[in-house]
Image: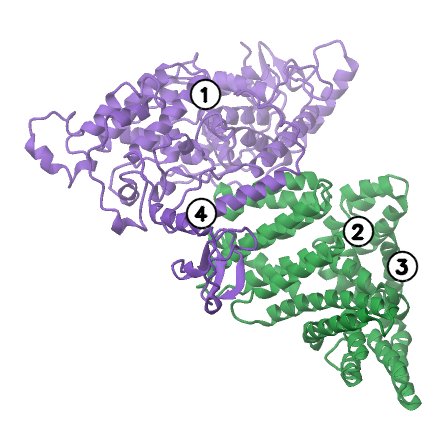
Chain colours: A green, B purple
Amino acid sequence: MSDFSEELVRPTTEDEQGETCVLSGTGMCFPWLQKHIETVGKTLVATGGKREKDFAQTTSACLSFIQEALLKHQWQQAAEYMHSYLQILEDSDSNKRQGAPEIIWRLGSEILYYHPKSSLETFNTFADRMKNIGVMNYLKVRSDLCDGGLFSSLWQISLQHALYLLHHGLLEDANRNLSQAETWRYGEKSSSKEVLINLIQAYKGLLQYYTWSKKKMELSQLDEDDYAYNTASQNMLNHSWKTSINLCALIQIPGVWDPFVKSYVEMLEFYGDQDGAREVLTNYAYDEKFPSNPNAHIYLYGFLKRERAPREKLISVLKLSIEKNMILHRKKEEHHKLGLEVLFGVLDFAGCTKNITAWKYLAKYLRQTLMGSHLAWVQEEWNSRKNWWPRFHFSYFWAKSDWKDDKTLACEKALVAGILLGKGICFIFFFSGHGF
Amino acid sequence: MDLEEAKEFKERCTQCAAVSWGLTDEGKYYCTSCHNVTERSKEVVNTEAIPNTKIQAINRGLKRKQKLEKGWDWYVCEGFQHILCQQADALQTLGVGPELKNEVLHNFWKRYLQKSKQAYCKNPVYTTGRKTAVLEDNPSHSDCDSAPELLSDFSCPSFVESGAESQPDGHARKPFSIIKAPQSEMASICSGSLDGVEYSLRKEKGIVKMSMPRTLAFCYLSLLWQRETVTLSDLLRFVEEEYIPYIHAFQQFPEEMKLYGRDKGIFAIESWPNYEDIYKKVIEVATFLDLPRFPDITEDCYLHPNILCMKYLMEVNLPDEMRDLTCQVVKVTGIGEVGFLTFDPVAKKTETVKYDVQAVAVIIVVLKLLFLLDDNLEWSLSSIAEKYNEDNKEDKPWFDFRKWYQVMKKAIDEKKQKWEEARAKYIWKSEKPLYHSAIDKPVVHKRREMVVNLQKQFSALVDSTPAVEKKSPSSFQFNWTEEDSDRTCFHGHSLQGVLKKKGQSLMTKNSLYWLSTQKFCKSYCKHVTTYEESNFSLSYRFVLNLFSFLLRIKTSFLHEEVSLIEKRLFKKKYNNKTKKKSSKSRKVRRH
C-alpha cells in the first residue's frame, strides 16, 4: 500500500514540482515502518514451544498462500484464502490474535486495492472494521502496558485509508478520517507514535492547504470592493491558522518534507509572516540533522528572490546551493549511489513492478556502478532485498507473464536479475530458452 | 468500562447510531456496540433526552441475564455418547454393517462407563458426595439403580435405535435430579454440562478419561472387531474429509445442550487426529476395557497383508504381478499368521499390527528387492524396459520404473497441492462461538461477529462458481483404470525385465539389497534408529513419501515399519553381524 504516498504527492504539488525538483521525486521516508514490521514478525515467531495445533498450521499455511497469490497478483485466490485466514482473529493464543489485525489490514487492503470486484465502499467498510478491531483490542488489553503498537497500527490504518480516499479524489472523506484518527490518543507517548500522529496532522494540514489555495484562486478573481471578498478572506484566515498548527509540528522533525514545507511557506508568506517563512526555510536547508536536500536550497533561494533580498545574500545562498549541487555533481559517483538507492526504493513498491523506465535505469546504473567497481554500494542495497526480491520480481511466474505482456520489460528485468543473482536462476533460464 | 456511569450520556453514536455508551479509563465515552471512541469526556455530558434510551435499557437488561446460559442438564459422558452415536451413524452410511453401532460400539461404550465407574456399577463417580445418602437409604438396590439417571438413559434403546434424534426427548421426559453446584462462586470456572468442571479436573490413576481422539479409538476398535474393510488410516482420512463427524461434532448437539466454559476444552479441538496418537489410544482403551481376544484375522480378511498389499499395489499403480512377491515376503516374515495379526489386548501384547502401514512397508521391501532403489540400478533397469517396450509394441509391456515415477510424481504432487490448499482453507471455528466464562462471553460474540462480517466481505470477491462437487468417500484415492495417455495404468505391465528363470522358480535379477536400518536398540524398546532423510537414496525417499502421504503418516514412521519387516526378512543377517551392504539372492517361487 505504500505506493499511495507517492500518488498523493503528485496531485497536491504537481504545478511547480516539475521544474524545481532536482532528484527523481519528492519523497518521504518511513524508517520506523520497517522496524515496526520486524518487531511484529518477531513476536509472531517467538510463540512456539509445544506441538502446534493444526489450527495454527492452517493459519500459517494460509498466510503463505495469500503472500504467494499477492506476489503473482492473483487477487481472487488471495481473497479466497483470506476468508479462512480471518479465523486467526479468534485464535486462543492472545499474542497471535493481537498481531493479526495488522497483518490482515496489510494483506486485505492490498487485495481490496487491486481486486477488480472491489469498490470504494468495500474498502471503506474494511478499513472501518479493522479500526474497530484495533479499538476493541485496545480496550481489552488497556491494563497492560503493551498498547503502544496497537495504537500506532490504528493510526497507520487511518493514514493509509486517508491516502486511499485521496487517491480516489475524496478529500472531504480523507479529512474526516484523519480528524477521527487524531482523536485516538491513548497510552504512553513514544517517538514512533509521535511521528505518526504528526504525519496524520500534516496530511490534514496539506488538505487544508489545498482548500485554502483553491479559495485563494477564487479570491484573486474577485474584486476587492466586492461584498463577497470580505467573507472569503475571513474564511481563508481561519484556515491558515489551523493549517499552520498542523503543518509545523511535522517539519520540525528531521526528514524530507518538501510538499509540506512548500505549502506551509506559501501560507506564511501570504499572511506576511516573512520572518517565520525565512526561519522555516533556513532551518530546512541548513539544519545538520536534516538529510541533505537540494530542493531545500532551491526553496530558500526562491523565497529570498521573491523577498527581493540584497544581491549579496542571494548570491551567497545560490553559491552555497550550487556548491552543494556541485558537490553532488562533482561526486558524480556519489550521485550514482543516490540514484541506485532511489531506483531500488521505487521498485520495492508493488505498483511499480512493471515500470520499464525504472528497470531500464536500474540496469544502466548497475552496470555503471559495477564498472566503477563500487560493488559495496550494490551490496548495501541488495542485502535487505535479497530475501524477497527474487520471489517478488524474478520468479519463474513473472518471467513468463512479463514475456507475454512486454518483451522489453522482460529483457531489462532479466538483465538486472543476471547482474544481481547470477545466471543460474530460473528467471534467466526461462529466457535462455527463448534464444538469449 | 463502567456502563453505569455512562448512563447519562444519551447521544447517538456517530458511527452506528446506537445509544449504548461505556467509559474508558480516561473518562471518555466509547460506543459498546461499535467501539467508536468519542472526543467527549464525562465532565461535558449533554443530558438532552433522546427517545431511544430504551436501547440502552434493553442492553443492560440483557447484560444481567446473559451471565450463564441455561439449558438441559447433561453430563460430559453424554456428550461423548452423542458424538460416538454420530460417528457410528456416519460409518453406517459409509457402508459398515449396523451391528457395529448396535452391538459392538454400544457394548464397548457400556463397558467403558462401567470400568470408569460412571454407570452400571455401585457408587458411580457422579453421585459420590452428593448422593451417597440416597444410596444408604436403599442399600438393597441393584447396581442398575445406583445410577438411575445414567442407566435409564443409556439402557433405553435410544442409543441403539436412532441415537441423536431420540435423545432430546429422553432428556425432556426425565429431567435430571442432581442439584447443580451453586453457580455464583463458579462464575469464572463454569461449564454448560453438569460435570464439565469436575471432569476437567479429574485425575484418577488407572482411569482412561474420554477425549475426542479416544472417540476415534472406540470407532476403530469396533471396526476391527467387526473386521470391516476400513483401516485406521482410512478412518482418519474420512475424518479429515469430514465424512465422519469429529472437529465440528459438538455443533450437532441438540440446541438445549449448552456448551461453554470447561466444555470447550473437552469437546472443541483444533487438531486433526494423528495416526500414531490414535494408534496408541486404541491400545490404551482396549487395555482399559480389558477386551478379550478379537476375532481372527485370517487370509480372507481385508486386513490380511496379502489383501491389503493388493489394494495398495492398485492404489499406487504398480503391476499386479508384484502380488506374488508381496505374498512371498509375507510368508517368509510370518506376518500373515493369524496369531500375529489378531489383536489380543489381554494377552499382554502392548501393540497391535498397524495393518495398513505394514502392508505398505511390504510393498516397499519388494520394490527394494526388485529395483534396489539406490538411484542407479532402477534407472538402468528402466532403460532396458524402455528399449524392450519400443521394440516389442505388441507384447505385454515391461514395467518401466522411470515412467512409473514420472506418472506418480505428477499425480502425487497434484494431490498434495490440493490437500494443502484444502487444509489451508479449512474453517475451524464454529458458527456459534465458545466462551470460557461469563466475562468472556460478550467479547467472544463480538469477535465472532466481526470475523463473520469480514469473511462475508472477502467471499463476495470470490467468484461464485460452485465448488467442485464433493467426491463420494472411497478407500481409494487414485483411480488408474481410465485409459489416459497422461496417466498410464501400469497394472497390466509385466515384471519379466527384472525377474529371471532358474529352473522351476523365478529369481530377481537384482541380487543386492541394502538395509534401511543397520542397528536396532539392544534394549526392549524395539526402537529403530531415526530416519535421517539425507542418508537415503532419492528413489527410496520418493517411495517413502508417496506412501506416507497416502496414509497421512510421518515418513519416519513408515521407515521404521520397513526396517521391522527387513528385520524379520533378514533375521540371520541381523543375528550375525550387520554389514553395511548385505547381499542376498533370494529365490522367488512362482505359484
Q: How far apart are marks 2 and 3 (CA)?
A: 17 Å
Q: Mark 2 lies on which chain?
A: A
In front: mark 3 or mark 1?
A: 3
Q: How far apart are marks 1 and 4 (CA)?
A: 40 Å
Q: Distance between the residues labelled 4 and 2?
A: 41 Å
Q: Distance between the residues labelled 3 and 1?
A: 66 Å
Q: Mark 3 lies on which chain?
A: A
Toward which corner of the image does residue B319 lie, by quadrant?
A: top right
Q: Do labels 2 and 3 share a chain?
A: yes
Q: Distance between the residues labelled 2 and 1?
A: 53 Å
* A77 or B408: nearer the viewer: A77
Please state which amino acid type lies under the numbered disc 2: Thr
Q: Are marks 4 and 3 on the same chain?
A: no
Q: Which SS class for mark 1?
A: loop
> Quick one: quadrant of the N terminus of chain B?
bottom left
User: Which residue lies at the image location 88% right of the left edge and 58% below the top edge?
Assistant: A361
Disc 4 to disc 2: CB gap under 8 Å? no
Please state which amino acid type lies under the numbered disc 4: Val
Location of mark 4 (residue)? B444
Q: Which SS class for mark 3?
A: helix
Q: Which chain carries label 4?
A: B
| Residue A343: x %, y % from top left | 82, 61
Q: Left or right: B172 with respect to A246? A: left
Q: Left or right: B153 with respect to B378? A: left
In front: mark 4 or mark 2?
A: 4
In front: mark 4 or mark 3?
A: 4
* B323 or A289: nearer the viewer: A289
Q: Which mark is residue A353?
A: 2
User: Counting other residues with Cα less than 10 Å from the Cα at mark 2, is it few (<14), some (14-19), or many (20 or more)?
Assistant: some
| Residue B13: x %, y % from top left | 53, 55
Q: Mark 1 lies on which chain?
A: B
Please state which amino acid type lies under the numbered disc 1: Val
